[in-house]
Amino acid sequence: MSDQTSASNNLAAYCWSIADLLRGDFKQSQYGRIILPFTLLRRLECVLEETKETVLGEHEELLKLDLPEEAQEKLLLRATQHNGNTLSFFNTSKMDLSKLGQAGIKDNLESYIQSFSKDAREIFEYFNFAEFIAQLNDADLLFSIVKKVRQTDLSPKAISNHDMGLVFEELIRRFAEGSNETAGEHFTPRDIVRLTTSLVFMEDDDALTKPGIIRTIYDPTAGTGGFLSSGMEYVHELNPQAVMRAFGQELNPESYAICKADMLIKGQDVTNIKLGNTLSNDQLYADKFDYMLSNPPFGVDWKKIESTIKDENTLKGYDGRFGPGLPRVSDGSLLFLMHLISKLRDASEGGGRIGIILNGSPLFTGGAGSGESEIRRYILEADLLETIVALPTDMFYNTGIATYVWVLSNKKADERKGKVQLINGANLCGKMRKSLGSKRNEMSSEDIATITRSFGAFEVVDARELDKPAEQKSNRGRQSANPKAEAPKTFASKIFATHEFGYRRITIERPLRESYQFSDERIAELRFAPKPLNAPMKWVYEAYGESWSDAADCENYGVLAEHEADIRKHLKTHFSDLKEAKIKELLDQKIWAAQKQCLLKAKQLQSEIGTAQCDDMNGYEAAIKAACKAQGITLEAKEKKQITTAVSWKNPAAEKVIKKLHKNTEANPLYGLFDVDGQTLEYKPDGDLRDNENVALDPSQTVNALNEAYFKKEVQPHVPDAWIDASKTDDKDQEVGIVGYEIPFNRHFYQYQPPRDLEAIDADLDTVSAEIMNLLQEVHS
């Protein structure tokens, strides 16, 4: 640890010692909400000390002019100029922490805070500082706290902006650890921040060391500003003279206040830190950035802003942020990724780089043609993705799930173009001495260096065993004499061409084969309407249809008025999903009469067609037409459909059902055009036998050649009557098959572990069986 860092930590520890006064009257999770604003207040006061009198004099003159607040602020900010530097805040009160007094300290402190310029004052408002001042006053602690705070020298002479930033970051870290039940929503662990920052900045190390360098950094989910601070710290270590301008937006008011305070302490222009929802209200819509870092919430839905997002996707397309597509409403992670991509500085202006932390879902969720797949397709085909790093589990305060760092850039080095590096760092961690919420693991500086070295070298690393302690297994319960060997902890890196994550989903069809039979059992089903009324009508018929007949003079057939109450009661109990409209339809005599009419017509057809089973559905239409003519009946479309459904069924042994005869068309069995006795036939597809196959992309071959070669090798030998559905084409390239992309990270790094020998398993079973028998003997004895 450097002397600078040690000094900063010591000062932070002193500032945090205010907690000794708070203990007992406030919860531990509330300490930071008091210590942070008081530390900020003392720092601002010390910074303003040199120009205090000048600002007060200017303020007295401005009061005489009766100018609006905005105009006054501009003039007063000029008065803060000292040694060539102009501050971004001021205070017009004649008081300071040493002049508040003990009597009336609450009112004096509130008045003092209200005298700050707008941006500084807003920070205290979002801290709900007035509420805590009142609580401290009620607990008779306010004077003691103020007295301790004002003894701390936080002047620029004693501590620079950079070092003060380190102090404030340490206070934020302590606050995060003290309130870890909600920390994960607003704080990203420092080890993850450091790793992500290193991956994003390391490619530009040479450029960042040049004199006079000016860069921008942005976080759309700024939280408390951890990523912004880490980015500035990284650059400061390389080049203390470099200027890094921070931009961010945060949804949570308290986190926004902490972030804004941190940026104010570091001398940043805090007007670049915005409050609000980044996805629905981008307050930095016109800006592009050099570096972007983000840890968006995992698996959070975007239903509340669904209409806004869909409007931007529909109306703006690729001119907006969400042109490639939209993920499912249940997870908005990829929306943040697309938002960041839209903020990349144009490659002609130097380009930009992105580091974003995502869970596993964006890697593979959604099949070909889905919004998620189309987003991945856009990223990979635009060659924006540089690397994905798998992190260990249990790294975050509020979740233990697997997470990944994605690094993207529109200024890839030549050797990286068309390539993606996958780095498996899932085992690069150590156990923490004390868990913080769900965070049980942490990455050391050496772990981080292992990943960054691999990324920087852009090399393939075959799985190599790490010098990491084995997982501690529970010694409770019975231990196996021959335990399964644990998989070794390894580190690996692989490099892929971008097209290797793509595939083309082709639809495989098989012919429909049907039989039909006008048997009494099948025709009897026509007495009842199709679902959802089929089962309820059967029950009604059994319960109340004893007196009904199929004779033409049966006037009470389907009349249910006197039984309506009992029927409704039964339906409510046994058919609760049945809607009111369907209940009314069931109680209406018309539907019973219609079904009876359909049944009687089917019986007339039966008398003509017979009751024998026919396994060639291709003759069905002719048979129906001849029977209708012979019996002098007419079938409505609805009746014909019901009768066909009742008397036919799928039968693998039946003949294929012909859909169309193609004249003057050459047969092409691969695409469903078959030569049968010199005629080109197209068969009806069987939806239940429909299947999809994923064909790997290969730019060196044509789409049809790839699809056909795959079909002949993987499909045709097993189902000779199948064909490729040529009507299912990709929206973008119009080729057969729908393009999809997924990144099966775990599959690429899977290590096979052979199962235990059967002899060892049998030995364990014999041992357990013997123990059980001994226990049973003890019970019987």
Image (cartoon, rainbow, N blue to C red):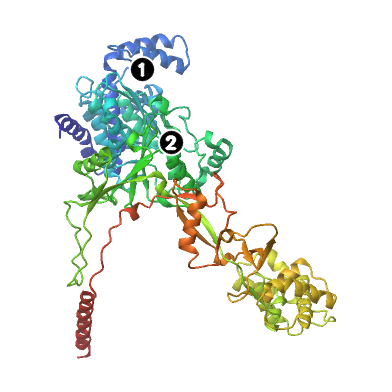
Asked whether the residues under the numbered discs 2 and 1 touch, taking CB atoms below 8 Å apart as contact, a structural biologist would say: no
Where does residue 420 sit, x and y in percent of width and height?
35, 43
Where does residue 361 sit, x and y in percent of width and height?
41, 51
Q: In front: 634, or 508? A: 508
- Comparing labels 2 and 1, the label whose residue is closer to the camera: 2
Q: Is residue 29 above or below residue 110?
A: below
Q: Is residue 362 left or right of residue 157?
A: right
Residue appearing at x 47%, y 57% in the figure: 709
Residue 477: quarter of image: bottom left
Quarter of the rendering occupied by the N terminus: top left
Quarter of the rendering occupied by the C terminus: bottom left
Q: Is residue 243 above or below residue 725?
A: above
Characterize the local packing of mark 2: few (<14), some (14-19) or many (20 or more) Cα atoms within 10 angstroms: many
Mark found first going from the N terminus, 2 or 1: 1
| Residue type at the position of mark 2 | Ile
Element class at badge 1: loop
Q: CA distance from mark 2 to mark 1?
A: 43 Å
Q: In front: 145, or 203? A: 203
Per the image, the residue denoted by label 2 is 341
Mark number for residue 92?
Answer: 1
Query: Across the whole image, how many numbered discs are drawn on residues?
Result: 2
